[in-house]
Structure formats: C-alpha cells, structure tokens
Image (cartoon, rainbow, N blue to C red):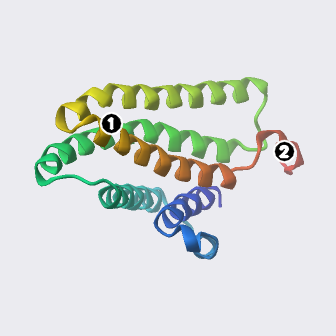
Amino acid sequence: MKIKIIAAALLGAATLALSPVNAQTAAAAPAAAAAAKPLTAADLEALRVELRSSKKQLTAEALTLTDAQATKFWPVYDQFIAELTHIHDTKYQLIAEYVNNYGKFDDKMALDYTNRMVDMDIKAAQLRAKYVPIFNRAVPGIVVATFFQIERRLQMVVDLKLATQLPILQLQSQVTQ
C-alpha cells in the first residue's frame, strides 16, 4: 500500500507535467490503477524513468536551440541528469522511509529525516550551481538561464505533487498503530 502511494504520486506528477489542463482527471486514473495491483520497486523505477523521459521531452519542446547549440547542450544535459538522478535516489529512499515509518516517528527520527531531506536539497542546489558554468561553456547565458528555469519549474511540479500525496507528520498521531 505504501509504495502504491509513492508510485501514484510519481505517475501523477508525470501526468501533471505532461498535461496540466487535465491534471485532476488524469491523476485519478493512476491512483485507481495503483490500488488494483501491488507495485514493486521495479514499477517505481519504471515510473522514474518515464518521468525523466517526459522532463527531457518537455525541456526539448520549451528550449530553443540551434543545431550547433543542441549538439553541445544535450550531452551536458544527460550528464547533469545522471548526477541529479543519484541525488533523487536519496530523495525517493527518504520518501519510502517516511511512508514506511509514518505513525512511528519520534522526535529523534523526525529530526534525522528532516536533516537528511535538507541535505539532499542542498546537494541538488550545489549540483545546479556546479553545472551553470558547464552549461555556459556549451550554450549562451540566456539559454542556460532558460534551461534552469524550465528544469526548476518541472522539478517543482513533481515536488508539489509528491508533497500533496504525503501526510503531514504531526498528523501521525491520528493513525492507528
């Protein structure tokens, strides 16, 4: 059940990112499908792969590149996403831990979880900062800024969708243990 929530959130986020107009109705279908069959770690990974592919497609559609710029940009993009994926691996492990321990958190566990989430956020920000000059060696500054605007907006959509699927920690006392 708990992995279903995560998988439904990820698929819902991908759906939301691809079809913002139909987000409410489209997001309901994955949740219903998730309830019908148990999801495995492989299912969750497949959803993450689909999400990364969707982000790349949306980036390609939103970013105007010349052929020469594209030749230089996309290899840097792929390298950036590979490194970001390692950071997001931690994020999804933390989300799974949160879901699996919801109702059991004490103050120490909650602070440890919070510190690790903040650390993951810092690592993602540091990676973006690291890649600004790397992207700028490939493409002009306007393109770099536009890419990071697109990347952040897409990530915020995913993060918001995930956040709306996870219960607030303080409400765990209302959960039967």
First reached walking from the N terminus: tag 2 or tag 1? 1
Q: Residues within 10 Å of mark 2 (few under 14, many from 20)?
A: few
**Is residue 157 at least partly visible in the picture?**
yes
Q: Residues within 10 Å of mark 1 (few under 14, many from 20)?
A: few
- What number of labels is visible? 2
Residue in the image at 79% along x and 43% along y: 103
Classify mark 2: helix, strand or loop.
Answer: helix
Classify mark 1: helix, strand or loop.
Answer: helix
Q: Label 2, on which residue?
A: 171
**Residue 146: % across, % down:** 36, 44
- Amino acid type, residue under disc 2 in the picture: Leu
**Residue 69: % across, % down:** 16, 46
Residue in the image at 65% along x and 25% along y: 112
- Residue projecting furthest to the front: 142
Residue in the image at 78% along x and 25% along y: 107
Tell me which corner region of the image, top left, top right, bottom left or bottom right, holds residue 30: bottom right
Q: Label 1, on which residue?
A: 83
